[in-house]
Amino acid sequence: MGKIKYIILFFIIGILAPGEIKIKIFEPIRFDDVVNEEIGKNIAVGVGIIEITTDNLKEDLGKKLVFNFPEKGLMTNRKKWIEIEKYQLENRDREIIIKNKIQQVKLYAILDKRKLDKGEEAAIIEGDYVGFVPMVISQYGRVMK
C-alpha cells in the first residue's frame, strides 16, 4: 500500500513539474575566414551556434539566461596549441531572453593570427582545431517590460 502512495506522489510531481530548458551546440566554432581584413589585420573570428530549446513555451517565455565563460581558451589540432583571446555572444551583455520555442544564438571566438603562425611548417599549422569552452548558464525568472 505504501508503494502505491509513492508511485502516485511521483506521478503527480512529474505532471506539475515546470518545463525544461535544453541547451546544446548546434554548430561548433569554425574559423572559415581567417584572411579577413574587415575585422582587423591580425584578428580571426570563429563563429559557432548554440541552440536553446524549451519544452513549455508558456512557462518559459520571457525568462532570462545569463552565459558566463572564461575570457581565454585553448584549441588544438593535436600538433599545435593556439590561444583564443576572447569568447563573445552575439549580444555583448551575455544575456538571452527566451522568445521562441527554439532559439539560436551565435558564439564568437576571437583569435590573434600572429600567435597562429610562428614560423612552423604548414603541416603543423593546418588541420581541424578542437577545444572546449566551459560555460556556466544561470536561469532567472521572467523579465518584466
Image: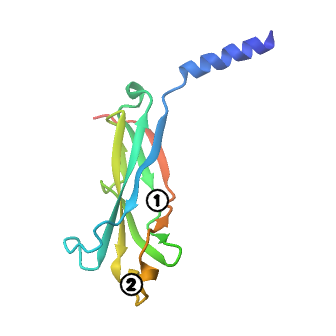
Question: CA separation, marks 1 and 2?
Answer: 26 Å
User: As displayed, is residue 27 above or below residue 117?
Assistant: above
Horizontal side, residue 9 vs residue 128: left or right? right
Compared with 47, 53 (above or below) is above
Q: Nearer the viewer, residue 143 or 13?
A: 13
Identify the secondary structure beneath mark 1. Answer: loop
Q: Specify whether 33 is left or right of 136.
A: left
Tell me the residue at 54%/24% (across/down): 17
Q: Can you name the residue that lies furthest to the top here? A: 1
Label 2 packing within 10 angstroms: few (<14), some (14-19), many (20+):
few
Residue occupied by mark 2? 117
- Kindly identify the amino acid type of the residue bearing the numbered disc 2: Asp
Q: Residue furthest left?
A: 38
Using the image as rendered, state which of residue 49 and residue 91 is in the foreground: 49
Residue at 33 percent across and 34 percent down: it is 100
Q: Give how far across and how far down residue 2 sits, in percent.
A: 80, 13
Quarter of the image for the C terminus: give it.
top left
Q: Quadrant of residue 8?
A: top right
Residue at mark 1 = 69
- Residue, x 44% and y 68% (percent of image)? 128
Secondary structure type for disc 2? loop
Q: Closer to the N terminus: mark 1 or mark 2?
A: 1
The image shows residue 49 at horizontal and vertical percentages of 37, 52
